[in-house]
Amino acid sequence: MSMYIWFALMIAVSAVWLIWFLLRPLKNNLFNLENSNIALGKQKQTELQQDLQLDLIDESVFDQAQDEITQTLAVELTQSSSDVGTVKSGSSIWLAGLSVVFISILSLGIYKALSPEISTQVPALDTQIMSLSLEESVVKIQDHLLDKPNDADAWKMLGLTYFELNNLDESLKAYEKSYQLNQRNPRLLVEYASAIATKNDDSFSGRPMELIKQALELEPDAPDALYVAGMFAVSIQNFDLAKALWQRSLSSLPLDSPDRSVLIEVLAELSGFMGEGDPQIAHSVAVRVTFSDQILASRSKDDYVMIYIKAAQGRPMPIAIQKIQLKDFTGVVELTDDDSVMPTRKLSQSEEVIAVVRLSQSGSAMKQASDIQVLSKVINVRDNPTVNLQVE
């Protein structure tokens, strides 16, 4: 409520200023006009006095002309005062009032258009059911759908809830309803395909794969769709395709996603089944670096951020490294075998290592006196860890 009071006060102050602005110039004009008429009258009287002294006119003419000047001045002053007063009390005040009304309406309209709309709706459905049991969630969603039967997201949520309750028949009905309402939701397509496959003894042939293909057409790098497509490839014994799909899925996942470790294990098992041994390409170390404001203020954007992995014991030579200028650094890098310094010593061949970040003006391999360096604790490459380093 206080917000509206402040807004009303702002309009009132603006209106007072506008009225003052409109009326004050008219008052000044009134004084200027009166002064001008008086000065003109005095000038005419002075000229008459000079004509009389020079014997250009006699006394009778002088007296008659002086009377005319006085009468004319009186009439002009009366008309001037009357005219200005009329404008002041008539058109100007009317204009000021109209302007105040216009400004108020315009201000309220602009405020309505630009200010964030205060929501009077109930919280989102998914927020409402977070603390409920699965059975209670079903009832809540069904009640919601009685009022909004065309809510595709609600039908999708109902399908997932029934799936978690292992009620596949009702789950498929709900997913189909959601699909009919919105066929361009990749996440829905993947969930629907998985539910159908579960109903068909984990077979992704037929309708499930049609849905997965549709999802990949909408979002080619959707990690979950790529993962399910890989499962189908395994089911038809196309292991090379499965490996390619799962690697694409892995590269599409955020570095801090918990699903990365699952995919890495799946790829390791697949490589072992294919007789390739441990898949070195799957191992990586993600390094996330945060610089304090003080450090950023004291360093040039052309300085180099050098992030590398070295052995926890033995030679200090980097095993894998990336060097990026500070202005181009996004905050996180992923070191893989592609970043290995020596082709005969891959990152995947290492186990216990240390992650290092160095902020360097020169970018030289040898540490300089002005360089700032932070080391991590000992980590294992086989764990595909994510390391957080703070440079202060």
Image: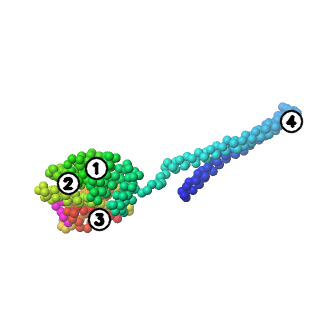
Q: Secondary structure at mark 3?
A: strand
Q: Disc 2 marks which amino acid? A: Asp
Q: Disc 4 marks which amino acid? A: Asp
- Judge whether residue 197 can be spotted in this image: yes
Camera-near label (2 vs 3) is 2
**349 in magenta:** yes
Q: Secondary structure at mark 4?
A: helix
Residue at figure coordinates x 27%, y 66% from the top left: 376
Residue at figure coordinates x 26%, y 46% from the top left: 214
Label placed on residue 63: 4
Percent position of residue 114, x then y: 49, 49
> Along the line of sight, which residue is nearer the eye, 44 or 328?
328
Name the residue carrying label 1: 189
Q: Secondary structure at mark 1?
A: helix
Residue at figure coordinates x 73%, y 40% from the top left: 83
Label placed on residue 374: 3
**116 in magenta:** no
